[in-house]
Image (cartoon, helix red, strand yellow):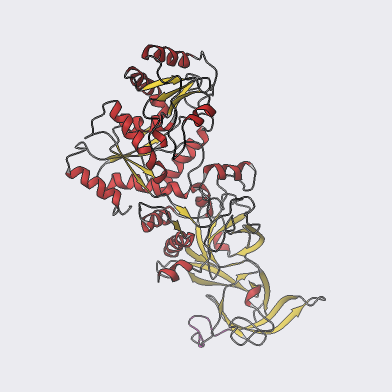
Amino acid sequence: MYLMVNFVQQEIENDLKEGKYSDGIHTRFPPEPNGYLHIGHAKSVCLNFGLAAHNNGLCNLRFDDTNPTKEDTEYVDSIQEDIKWLGFDWDDRKFFASDYFGKLYDYAVELIKRGLAYVDDSSADEIREMRGTLTEPGKESPCRNRSIEENLNLFERMKAGEFEDGAKVLRAKIDMASPNMNMRDPVIYRITRTHHHRTGDDWLIYPMYDFAHPLSDAIEKITHSVCTLEFEDHRPFYDWLLDSLDFDKNSRPRQIEFARLDLTNTITSKRKLRQLVEEKHVRGWDDPRMPTLSGMRRRGFTPAAIRNFCAEIGVAKSNSLVDIAMLEHCVREDLNENADRIMAVLNPLKVVLTNVDAGKVEWLTAENHPTKGGSRFVPFTREIFIERDDFMEDAPKKFFRLKPGGEVRLKHAYIIKCEEVIKDDSGNITELHCTIDPTSKSGGETAGRKIKGTVHWVSADYALKAEVRLYDYLLTTDEKGNLPEDFIGALNPDSLIVIENALVEPSVKLTGAGVHFQFLRLGYFVTDYDTTPEKLVFNRVAGLKDSWAKVKG
């Protein structure tokens, strides 16, 4: 499902050769439930579940829910839905860091007993000032040398709710002169009277992520804790904590970092994505312009395309910016293979076929897919609609679509010739009068007559009205795809264009949400969740033009 040729897999193989992890490989995907998963998370999902599958191991889903001020069951539910949509399953191995709050508290007590943690009365600002800088060592807190007995007493009273939020914290006792800022007595517990989405009001103190993460890994017997590069500087604390609590080096988890996914024209900051939602710049987390997996699913991106994209970009040790055209290429490749073809007209121009009898309907056979086959019937009548852009009154020499006196072939139908252009009093073209070559249909005498232009069309009598939503990038960027600091100011005013009176052939009647089509000559589209039996709504997934394929070629 996910090609495992990368440096992380090589590290796993090296560990196995050295006799480590004899019980098998065990990974985890550990999202914090404070937002929806985005395309960057997809890479981590594919990597962690893929490594487990490749090594005949297991992968857990664990929610690192240690910050109740930002977390919600809505996000828990959406994350599970997105992972399953991508094609992965954790079986019965769904866990929460909150499952271990009791054990984590006991581990913190053990650190205190070993003289490796202390309760600090300093405020957040004071602790920040005492940490020092990259060039200057930190300063020890006045509380650093409290006795073990006093620290145990104070920590128990923190748990009991005797102190106000922020009045005290528990800090690891490591090295205030360490060149790594994360080792300068980091905070590992804080007081916060916030209702937790799972434990309610049972706890008044919560572990910090850097404390809960390695211990949760160890509790679950994770072998390889695969993280993005921003956690590289946190790895010394990860190892220090496991060392300090005597976890066996041959079986305890090992943290390995890889480069996260950064895409051009895309933001993957949960904070910024939440701002877009809360300030109503988008319709919600699943807005098709959002880089969230739920947004991409609604846009019409397929899980296979996203998995293929993650495999294509690989796993690197250094950050880089990936062209979003590469993702779009993967989407086109998948839909080109799997989406049925239909005809739709977005900007209709009426055509009256004067040598076709009024009221006559001819049901023509049209192929559903050029390689997979299948067929459907499309109605052909005296009045049809073509794209307005497929006619030009004063056409240049190399315009091979319809023009006065010119001919084009109607897809799946006849060759037509434009005989007359009808205009209103303002000079606007309202309709075309054309004639058909009745012998030019497939099987007819002149069916093989060479006509350079072929256009799509729909019957005026049978076409269904549809709302079509054309999506573009949500944000405008520079020529390299980078976003400005003011990302709200970079919002693209044309990121959504709604066509309310598009027309589609009747074969799509009663099509449910999530069905993909290629609108011939227009691009790939999917039926939106807003579709009802009374109203068809389509989202454009991608155009037919593939800039990445040209670059790749």
Q: Quadrant of residue 467?
A: bottom right
> Which residue occupies 50% across, 32% down?
73
Q: Is residue 104 magenta?
A: no
Kindly indicate the quadrant of the structure image that contains residue 69.
Answer: top right
Image x and y of residue 156, in percent:
43, 14
In the depicted view, which residue is nearer to us: 495 or 422? 495
What residue appears at the point 63 percent right and 50 percent down from the top-left corner?
Answer: 488
Residue 445 magenta-drawn?
Answer: yes
Quadrant of image for the C terminus: bottom left
Q: Is residue 372 above or below residue 282?
A: below
Q: Position of residue 496 (x, y in %)?
A: 63, 57
Residue 259 point in image, percent of width and height: 39, 50
The part of the chain drawn in magenta is 438-447
Relative depth, front residue between 514 and 306: 306
Quick check: can you spot residue 368?
A: no
* Residue found at x 42% / y 29%: 186
Observer-nearest residue: 17 or 418?
17
**Location of residue 380 (image quadrant):** bottom right
Q: Is residue 168 above or below residue 96?
A: above
Decide: is 233 above or below 266. above
Can residue 391 be seen in this snapshot? yes
The extreme right residue here reads 425
